[in-house]
Amino acid sequence: MNKVGLLFSRLRKEEKLLFDAATNQGVQIERVDSRSLVMDDQSKFQFEVMLDREISHTRSLYIIQLMESVGVHTINSHQIASVCGDKVVTTTALNTAGVPNLKVKVAFTHETALEAIESMGYPVVLKPVIGSWGRMLAKVNDRDAAEAILEHKSFMPSSHHSIYYIQEYVEKPGRDIRAFYIGDETICAIYRSSEHWITNTARGGETANCPVTNEISNLCEQTAQAVGGGLLAIDIVETPNGLMINEVNHKMEFRNSIDVTGVDIPGQIIYYALNMGKKF
């Protein structure tokens, strides 16, 4: 069946590129708008595979779990999304598999978080355990900043902010690397450069092609095996001790990476989804 479902609540440039890629490959896309979706254990769909492009992590997790319960294969799976969508779970998976990644401490009160920060040494980076696009990150340079930021986080209503994810700060060479992994291959990679310490393209980082070296390819393969595979955007930092994983993203954004790499990323995503469907 040349039909693939696509879960969304907002159609961005990436989703439109996926629609175009599907048309080029003769694949029919059935749009699944989460805002109008109601499911139970008898729900039936006219597709066997669904691409998850829902921007809400919480909504996405529930929907793909329900989809899998009625026989739909989701990309990515609930298991992969659960690992990659929570930075604590991601770090645990990487450490368990022995994948080199930036040092992290996790604390559960702002008092113990301050102790953890001081033991790591300034500067450190505070991140929300769930989040993307470089939002709500804080580079903490000294104790005064740490005390202020931790106090503010302690009063935020979301329970996620009561989990303190503290990552070592690495002086990057003005850039980091984002690699795109599909199925069992690193298909391309980009450098993201910025004068700011946050290099996300969503925050204005500039892109350039990054050759996929054996070191990058091997690191991405180890990372994919640790989190479960699928479609991944893997963020890598160049450090004095070699390449280290920074984050693993299970819903890749690619609009700024197609032209600079010359790789048809949306086309490869659709091809992967279609071939997954043929397995079942």
Image (cartoon, rainbow, N blue to C red):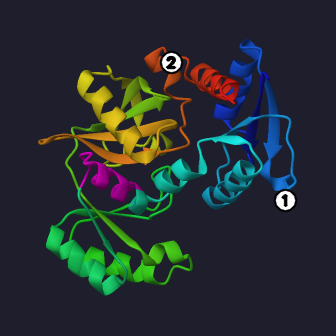
Residue positioned 50% across, 29% down in the render: 183
Q: Residue 16, labelled with which disc?
A: none
Classify residue 64 as left or right of residue 257.
Answer: right
* Residue 91 lies in the magenta stretch: yes
Magenta region, main secondary structure:
helix
Count of numbered marks: 2
Between circles 2 and 1, the one closer to the viewer is 1
The segment highlighted magenta reads 90-102
**Mark 1 secondary-structure assignment:** loop
Q: Is residue 141 above or below residue 162?
A: above
Query: Where the C terminus falls, by quadrant?
Result: top right
Q: Residue 259, labelled with which disc?
A: 2
Residue positioned 46% across, 37% down in the render: 233
Estimate the x, y position of residue 64 in percent, counting from the top left.
68, 51
> Which residue is tagged 1?
40
Q: Is residue 271 visible?
A: yes
Q: Which residue type does callout 2 highlight?
A: Asp
Q: Name the residue nearer the viewer: 213 or 197.
A: 213
Query: Where the N terminus falls, by quadrant?
Result: top right
Classify residue 132 as left or right of residue 39.
Answer: left
Q: Which residue type does callout 1 highlight?
A: Asp
The quadrant in which residue 92 appears is bottom left
Question: Which residue, as the protein is rendered here, is positioned at the far front?
Answer: 280
Q: Is residue 52 visible?
A: no
Classify residue 241 as left or right of residue 166.
Answer: left
Q: For label 1, count other residues whose C-alpha is less than 10 Å away and answer few (under 14), some (14-19) or many (20+).
A: few
